Image (tube, helix red, strand yellow):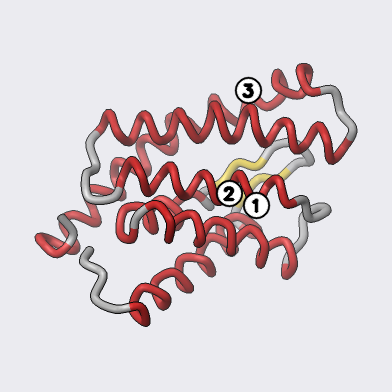
Amino acid sequence: MKKTGNAKTLAIMGLLIAAEIVLSRFFSINAWNIRIGFGFVPVAFAGILLGALPAGIVAAAADVLGALLFPTGPFFPGFTLTAFLTGVVLGAFLYEKQTYPRIVCAVLLNQLLLSWLLNSLWISILYDSPYLPLLGTRLIQIAILVPVQIIVIGTLTRTVRVALGSEMI
Protein backbone atom coordinates (compact mmCIF):
# COMPACT_ATOMS: atom_id res chain seq x y z
CA MET A 1 0.00 0.00 0.00
CA LYS A 2 1.40 3.35 -0.94
CA LYS A 3 1.47 5.86 1.88
CA THR A 4 -0.66 8.64 0.45
CA GLY A 5 -0.88 10.82 3.52
CA ASN A 6 -0.44 10.93 7.25
CA ALA A 7 -4.18 11.23 7.92
CA LYS A 8 -4.93 8.05 6.00
CA THR A 9 -2.06 6.20 7.71
CA LEU A 10 -3.17 7.38 11.16
CA ALA A 11 -6.76 6.36 10.45
CA ILE A 12 -5.64 2.88 9.40
CA MET A 13 -3.42 2.62 12.47
CA GLY A 14 -6.30 3.69 14.73
CA LEU A 15 -8.60 1.05 13.29
CA LEU A 16 -5.93 -1.63 13.64
CA ILE A 17 -5.25 -0.60 17.26
CA ALA A 18 -8.97 -0.92 18.04
CA ALA A 19 -9.15 -4.30 16.30
CA GLU A 20 -6.10 -5.58 18.19
CA ILE A 21 -7.58 -4.52 21.54
CA VAL A 22 -10.89 -6.25 20.81
CA LEU A 23 -9.24 -9.46 19.54
CA SER A 24 -6.70 -9.63 22.38
CA ARG A 25 -8.95 -8.64 25.27
CA PHE A 26 -12.26 -10.23 24.32
CA PHE A 27 -11.55 -13.03 21.85
CA SER A 28 -8.50 -14.70 23.40
CA ILE A 29 -7.83 -17.42 25.90
CA ASN A 30 -6.02 -15.71 28.77
CA ALA A 31 -4.29 -17.20 31.78
CA TRP A 32 -1.64 -15.63 33.98
CA ASN A 33 1.15 -16.99 31.76
CA ILE A 34 -0.55 -17.81 28.43
CA ARG A 35 -2.55 -15.86 25.84
CA ILE A 36 -3.85 -17.61 22.76
CA GLY A 37 -5.86 -15.62 20.25
CA PHE A 38 -5.90 -13.62 17.06
CA GLY A 39 -4.63 -10.26 18.36
CA PHE A 40 -1.61 -10.70 16.09
CA VAL A 41 -3.74 -10.26 12.94
CA PRO A 42 -4.13 -6.44 13.06
CA VAL A 43 -0.41 -6.09 13.87
CA ALA A 44 0.53 -8.34 10.94
CA PHE A 45 -1.85 -6.35 8.76
CA ALA A 46 -0.11 -3.12 9.88
CA GLY A 47 3.25 -4.69 9.05
CA ILE A 48 2.08 -5.74 5.59
CA LEU A 49 0.44 -2.41 4.74
CA LEU A 50 2.52 0.17 6.60
CA GLY A 51 5.92 -1.27 7.50
CA ALA A 52 7.99 -1.94 10.61
CA LEU A 53 7.72 1.28 12.65
CA PRO A 54 3.95 1.82 12.17
CA ALA A 55 3.30 -1.86 13.00
CA GLY A 56 5.40 -1.50 16.15
CA ILE A 57 3.46 1.60 17.12
CA VAL A 58 0.14 -0.17 16.50
CA ALA A 59 1.17 -3.09 18.70
CA ALA A 60 2.57 -0.91 21.51
CA ALA A 61 -0.36 1.51 21.50
CA ALA A 62 -2.83 -1.38 21.55
CA ASP A 63 -0.97 -2.93 24.48
CA VAL A 64 -1.01 0.27 26.52
CA LEU A 65 -4.60 1.23 25.68
CA GLY A 66 -5.84 -2.33 26.16
CA ALA A 67 -4.14 -2.54 29.56
CA LEU A 68 -5.64 0.79 30.64
CA LEU A 69 -9.16 0.21 29.32
CA PHE A 70 -9.56 -3.55 29.84
CA PRO A 71 -6.88 -4.82 32.22
CA THR A 72 -6.30 -8.56 32.46
CA GLY A 73 -3.51 -8.15 35.00
CA PRO A 74 -1.08 -5.51 36.18
CA PHE A 75 0.45 -3.24 33.54
CA PHE A 76 4.11 -4.02 32.89
CA PRO A 77 6.13 -1.98 30.35
CA GLY A 78 8.16 -5.03 29.34
CA PHE A 79 5.11 -6.42 27.56
CA THR A 80 4.73 -3.13 25.70
CA LEU A 81 8.35 -3.39 24.57
CA THR A 82 7.73 -6.94 23.36
CA ALA A 83 4.57 -5.82 21.56
CA PHE A 84 6.48 -3.02 19.82
CA LEU A 85 9.26 -5.41 18.78
CA THR A 86 6.67 -7.91 17.52
CA GLY A 87 5.20 -5.27 15.22
CA VAL A 88 8.65 -4.21 14.05
CA VAL A 89 9.58 -7.80 13.20
CA LEU A 90 6.33 -8.40 11.33
CA GLY A 91 6.75 -5.15 9.40
CA ALA A 92 10.43 -5.80 8.64
CA PHE A 93 9.67 -9.24 7.22
CA LEU A 94 6.29 -8.65 5.58
CA TYR A 95 6.24 -5.08 4.24
CA GLU A 96 6.47 -4.99 0.44
CA LYS A 97 7.43 -8.66 0.10
CA GLN A 98 5.48 -11.52 1.59
CA THR A 99 6.87 -14.96 0.85
CA TYR A 100 6.38 -18.19 2.75
CA PRO A 101 9.98 -18.20 4.11
CA ARG A 102 9.61 -14.57 5.28
CA ILE A 103 6.31 -15.38 7.02
CA VAL A 104 7.85 -18.42 8.73
CA CYS A 105 10.91 -16.41 9.84
CA ALA A 106 8.76 -13.58 11.22
CA VAL A 107 6.52 -15.97 13.14
CA LEU A 108 9.39 -18.06 14.52
CA LEU A 109 11.35 -14.98 15.57
CA ASN A 110 8.31 -13.51 17.28
CA GLN A 111 7.17 -16.69 18.95
CA LEU A 112 10.51 -18.13 20.02
CA LEU A 113 12.55 -15.05 20.82
CA LEU A 114 9.97 -12.44 21.79
CA SER A 115 7.00 -14.37 23.13
CA TRP A 116 8.66 -17.43 24.60
CA LEU A 117 11.95 -16.03 25.91
CA LEU A 118 11.27 -12.33 26.46
CA ASN A 119 7.63 -12.44 27.61
CA SER A 120 8.49 -15.39 29.86
CA LEU A 121 11.16 -13.19 31.44
CA TRP A 122 8.60 -10.43 32.02
CA ILE A 123 6.14 -12.91 33.55
CA SER A 124 8.93 -14.29 35.74
CA ILE A 125 9.79 -10.80 36.99
CA LEU A 126 6.19 -9.65 37.40
CA TYR A 127 4.96 -12.72 39.28
CA ASP A 128 8.26 -13.69 40.94
CA SER A 129 8.06 -17.07 39.22
CA PRO A 130 11.11 -19.21 38.31
CA TYR A 131 12.10 -18.53 34.70
CA LEU A 132 13.13 -21.98 33.45
CA PRO A 133 10.03 -23.89 34.62
CA LEU A 134 7.90 -21.09 33.17
CA LEU A 135 9.47 -21.70 29.76
CA GLY A 136 8.15 -25.25 29.83
CA THR A 137 4.59 -24.23 30.58
CA ARG A 138 4.62 -21.64 27.82
CA LEU A 139 5.64 -24.17 25.16
CA ILE A 140 1.95 -25.04 24.78
CA GLN A 141 1.22 -21.50 23.59
CA ILE A 142 4.13 -21.59 21.14
CA ALA A 143 3.14 -25.02 19.78
CA ILE A 144 -0.38 -23.75 19.09
CA LEU A 145 0.42 -20.27 17.80
CA VAL A 146 3.31 -21.00 15.42
CA PRO A 147 1.28 -23.02 12.90
CA VAL A 148 -1.84 -20.88 13.41
CA GLN A 149 0.07 -17.65 12.76
CA ILE A 150 1.87 -19.05 9.71
CA ILE A 151 -1.43 -20.17 8.17
CA VAL A 152 -3.39 -17.02 9.09
CA ILE A 153 -0.67 -14.58 8.00
CA GLY A 154 -0.15 -16.54 4.77
CA THR A 155 -3.88 -16.34 4.06
CA LEU A 156 -3.95 -12.67 5.05
CA THR A 157 -1.13 -11.77 2.67
CA ARG A 158 -2.84 -13.50 -0.25
CA THR A 159 -6.14 -11.82 0.61
CA VAL A 160 -4.55 -8.38 0.92
CA ARG A 161 -2.73 -8.85 -2.38
CA VAL A 162 -5.97 -9.74 -4.16
CA ALA A 163 -7.98 -6.96 -2.45
CA LEU A 164 -5.48 -4.20 -3.07
CA GLY A 165 -4.03 -5.46 -6.33
CA SER A 166 -1.10 -3.54 -7.68
CA GLU A 167 -1.50 -0.75 -5.09
CA MET A 168 0.09 -2.97 -2.46
CA ILE A 169 3.27 -4.19 -4.10
Say which residue label 1 marks: 80
Image vertical order of residue 76 relative to residue 113, above or below: below
Residue appearing at x 38%, y 35% in the figure: 150
Image location of residue 134, percent across then percent down: 76, 24
Q: Which mark is residue 119?
A: none
Q: Quadrant of the C terminus?
A: bottom left
Say which residue label 2 marks: 83
Say which residue label 3 marks: 139
Q: Are marks 3 and 2 in contact (CB under 8 Å)?
A: no
Choose top left, top right, bottom left or bottom right for residue 45: bottom left
Image location of residue 54, percent across then percent down: 43, 61
Image location of residue 85, percent across then percent down: 53, 45
**Which residue occupies the extreme left position in the image?**
166
Q: Quadrant of the N terminus?
A: bottom left
Q: Nearer the viewer, mark 1 or mark 3?
A: 1
Mark 2: which secondary structure? helix
Choose top left, top right, bottom left or bottom right for residue 32: top right
**Which residue occupies the extreme bottom position in the image?**
7
Three-letter amino acid code of the residue under disc 2: Ala
Three-letter amino acid code of the residue under disc 1: Thr
Three-letter amino acid code of the residue under disc 3: Leu
Give the tally of numbered discs: 3
Q: Are marks 2 and 1 in contact (CB under 8 Å)?
A: yes
Is residue 156 shown left or right of residue 81?
Answer: left
Q: Residues within 10 Å of mark 1 (few under 14, many from 20)?
A: many
Choose top left, top right, bottom left or bottom right for residue 8: bottom left
Mark 1 vs 3, N-terminal side: 1
Instruction: Say which of 165 and 93 sits in front.
Output: 93
